[in-house]
Image (cartoon, rainbow, N blue to C red):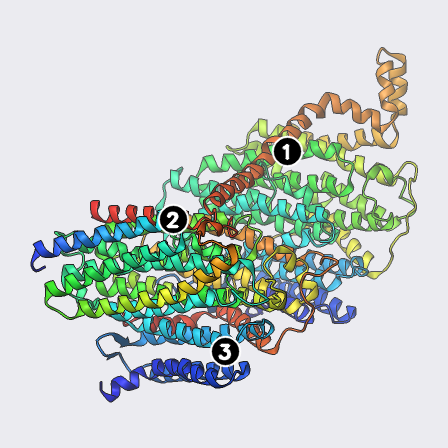
Amino acid sequence: MLDWLWLVPGLPFLGFLILFAGQGKMPKRWTTLVGVGSVGLAALVTLLIAVEFYGTPEAALTYRQTLWTWMEAGSLKPGFSLYLDGLALSMLFVITGVGFLIHLYASGYMYEDEDFPRFFTYTNLFVAAMVMLVLADNLVLLFLGWEGVGLCSYLLIGFWYRDPENGRCARKAFIVTRIGDTAFAIGLFLLFRELGTLDIQDAMSAATATWPRDSGTATLIAVLLLGGAVGKSAQLPLQTWLPDAMAGPTPVSALIHAATMVTAGVYLIARTHVLFQLSTDAMQLVALVGVLTLLMSGFTALTQTDLKRILAYSTISQIGYMFLALGVGAWSSAIFHLMTHAFFKALLFLTAGSIILSVHHQQDIFKMGGLRKALPVPFATFLVGCLGLTALPPTSGFFSKEQILNAVWSSPTGGQLIWAGAVLGAFITAIYTFRMFFIVFFGEQQTEAHEHKGFKFHVPLIVLAVLAAVGGFFHLPLTSALPHAGHDHVPLGVEVTAIALPMVGVLLAYLLFYRQIPALRQLFETGPLKSLAAFFYSGWAMDWLYDRLLVKPFVALARWNSKDLVDQLPAVVSRGAALFHRLLSLSQNGQLRYYVATMALASLVVMAVAVYTG
Amino acid sequence: MTMTELHALLPIIVIAGISVVLMVMTAFFRHQRLASLITYGGFIAAAVLVAGQTGSGPQQATPLLIMDEYSRFFSLVILVTSLAATMLAYDYLRRSDVFKEEYYILLSLAVLGAVVLVSSNHFAAFFIGIELMSVSLFAMVGYMVQGRTRRAVTLEASVKYMILSGVSSSFLLFGIALVYADFGVLSFSGLHSLLGLHSTSSYSQIGAAMIVVGLAFKLSWVPFHMWTPDVYEGAPVPVTAFLATVSKVSVFAIIVRFFIESGAFRLEALVQALVWIAVLSMLVGNGLALLQQNIKRLLAYSSIAHLGYLMVAFIAIAGSNLANTNLAVEATAFYLVAYIVMSLIAFGIITTLSSPERAEEAETLAHFRGLFWQKPGLATAMGLALLSLAGIPLTIGFVGKFYVFAAGVAGQLWLLVGVLIVGSALGLYYYLRLIMEMCKAPDTEPAISREETPLENRVVLSALGLVLLVIGIFPNGLITTVHAAVAVLR
Amino acid sequence: MVDVALIDHVFILAAILFCLGLVGVLVRRNIIFMLISMEIMLNAAGLAFIAAGSAWGQPDGQVMFLAVVTLGAAEVAVALGLTLLLFRRYQSVDVDNLKELRG
């Protein structure tokens, strides 16, 4: 059964080829069959492989399959070879499994779109590239997958090309991630240069043999790879592209910008964990990036009003948790959280898609309200998703986040301050999640809603809801692929705080946005806080309050950061490149005699060099 | 001249025959279809003859020309490229209102020059080949300078090309004269025991530098590149296609042979100068292409950058390790083929979309906006070519770039490899910008004609697209061929 | 190298001619003078070939000179045609008129 591994990337790629050859002239039914079926079959193959995989003893859990030697350039012979281990298999579950559900959903969601076939053409290609990225056994193939998913992401953000704004968003995503990708390419190149092999596993074992702990080279390479991961996974300081990427269709947001592609950075660091283990500084940096990102994007999510943007910021924040986990050496917890996040975030996005479709493409949560009765299924599934995101027991998110927080407390690269940041983040997560939940589903209904019913809409939602609820009990086969973090014993108080704070957050959100504080009001009406209580009548007032007390400093920082510093980075790069272009263009002035003069001068230089240094 | 020499020269004689037959024919009656068929037939016959001789060992035909695996490989590449370029030009010429038949005469003369050039191992043949090609190219660049359907800029392009090319030829010649004065030898292999080992005289050092300057112009290495965008834009696009592929590739093929056989790599100062030329080519080429709005100019700048990438492998040949040297030579040969395939597709698409009857070339972004919705086949081919130029995996361009990269790494040219990576990152931006443009909503008033794509263009473009993909996925066939072809050098 | 003194002298002359030609191409705007300057550059190379050939006692230098002369003739044939068109278009032979292609 393991021999069938090549089918996992092969089937979606075949689907891509068929759809591409069809050029949109195939009937929609066939398009659906090919587009969804290919990913479904890939998921089935993954499942069969997993069955066999789980049957073998853990120590022997690797499998290599060489399809063909891609090219032989001297001693470099990158092959089309796949490498399967527990880490890759865990990723395959997410990509094909969640991917299939999202495809199924998309076949309903995108049905009316005139570019229905093009959508599946891109997404099938995306799945193939993403699987390639995960299964690659050498750096070249990894790079192929990395560039491939980037390309698909770019095409899909700009999917609705008629709106030039979407093109702008796609370009922004492209430029910002390109900065990371360049760092990534340089990192891969250095890795190859220092270790002389393209094979990832060989490189990792060579790394430990070559470099001592905390060697400068290892740190440099790790930081460069981190640069690539930060770009792809929308972490500080390259996070600004992800909220704009919401311009793409909602299933794309669920598939690429929540469940799979944006977690490629996490996968990359986990795959090269040996390198990061060699460098305490790099680990520390990963942890810091994680915690700062999760806090900053959490606070930003508090103030957003666009449903998809809230989810986008929460994605950034949750990936921040994964980075934090990687930074403190809790490798398998990071991947575990990656999986549970894929479940509940895909669920949230798809449900959000259903809601948005039901209210005629309204995305502002304050223009929704009271949708509980009109949309019963989305209501239920959204609730499950929110619980998962908030990490309340016993949902999947609880298990993964608890592991991470415990690991942070006791890790040398974590510590209590970072732990406090992460727990604060969890608290904020609870507030913004349930703020969104209560505003969308409770209160006065602001708009008409027509639920889109049917198999294609409900089945993925329900399956994902079940997964989001019970996914925490899954056992991922990671013990052989990633070093075990060890059972961290943390003081009981710490654990209780970590579990309780999100609950407090939910309660607070409940009081503020559901009950609209009648209880608090009474309390305040008798006291000197009476005037202050006026703010609590509405969510708006409360918004204003915590805006002042809490969020403003952070948002100011975030805004300063997102409008000036971080947006500056891509802007500086693109402006610098544009300036470079203009300066060079001046040299191309069209004057024949000037061209001759340049040539004469340049040849003088060449001749002088040849004579005087020769 | 013996029979074996004559046999070896037969392909060259056939190509020369094309132009003679066409000249005679045109004197009596004009018929574009017939002229084109004669040209195709001649190229195919010559290609078959070359292919038939493959594997028969090196054959020196007169002291001037060598027929070995290397020259046969590149002759074959040039003939097939020219065939494709001629087929792509047919419909374009048909729709213009100039005399058509002379185009085929000039083209076959240029091809003759190119084949002589890649087969030369003597300065005389080298010089004759390069000038035969260049002078034919002046005339081709200025081919549509008259007539109702002329474009105003064609004249400018041809004058610029002529003057600059003349100046560069003078440099080349003077350089050859200096080297000759120093050693009294004109054959490449005769120089091998002399050049660079004879450090007392600066004649040969200056001479080699001047030869490099002359060739740098033809290859548009920065800072000898300034003519490139102007000529690419001004020339009729089928001529640009020919200029960008055949002339570049043949000159590059011969500079590799010249440097290896004459031992010019021993001139370390010159190689150091080449390193900086390569760095400049990659950076300036990509930088100029970055925000370029005219597609022909964009491709011109991108070709400058690609020639810069090729230089990385070229400079890697200088290394002392034989295995690495072979790798580097293979990399240049492979990359040249890749470069031809993708450039030919890109220019072929522009040719197909252009309307010579309205003196309009499909060179603005507006011509490409929404192409995916109007002409999906052409847009797909163009998309493939652009992805390949950008070096996205699974295309021939990626394999080529990887090869060059491997050669640079093996030669430990870290500066060049670093610039190669940065340059490719810049390149991706403008290639994908064009792809996005093709994906956009079409303008209400389509800038391109809605005519059916002619059969010839369709066949050529699909074949090239297929080659681009197949070699991108299974490159080992071509790698083996290239490996065998370059083994004869040194 | 044979007869160093002679060859050096001729090469100095050839180099001066070459530079004169190059400067001529640079400073003249009249296309006809540019073409003449180009011819001077070519002939400087031709002179160098003849000198080198005679110094080595070989005919090769003269053969190359013939090739150079042929090239010069071929170039001028095309060039004069273009000059004519240039004059018709702009009513002048000033190459500085040609500056549409740029950027």
| Residue under numbered circle 3 | B101
Q: Residue at x 90, y 13 (%)?
A: A526
Q: Which amino acid type is shown beneath numbered disc 1?
A: Ser
Q: Which mark is residue A1?
A: none
How dense is the environment of label 3, judged by Cα within 10 Å: few (below 14), some, or many (20 and up)? many
Q: Residue furthest top?
A: A528
What kind of element bears circle 2?
A: helix
> Which residue in the structure is indicated by mark 2?
B279
Frontmost residue, B336 versus B145: B145
Res. B311 in view: no
In this rendering, does residue C16 appear at all?
yes
Work out whether residue A44 or residue A396 is closer to the camera in this orientation and state it.
A44
Please, what is the three-letter code of the amino acid marked with disc 3? Glu
> Does residue A555 appear left or right of residue A609 in this picture?
right
Between label 1 and label 3, give the one nearer the viewer: 3
Residue on which disc 1 sits: A562
Badges 3 and 2, same chain: yes
Could you tell me how far apart the alpha carbons at marks 3 and 2 are, in whole angstroms? 42 Å
Distance from the alpha carbon under mark 1 to that under mark 3: 63 Å
Residue B192 rendering spot, x and y as whole percentages: 18, 64
* Circle nearer the N terminus (3, 2): 3
Task: Determine the secondary structure under disc 1.
Answer: helix
Could you tell me residue B367's position as x and y percent?
64, 59
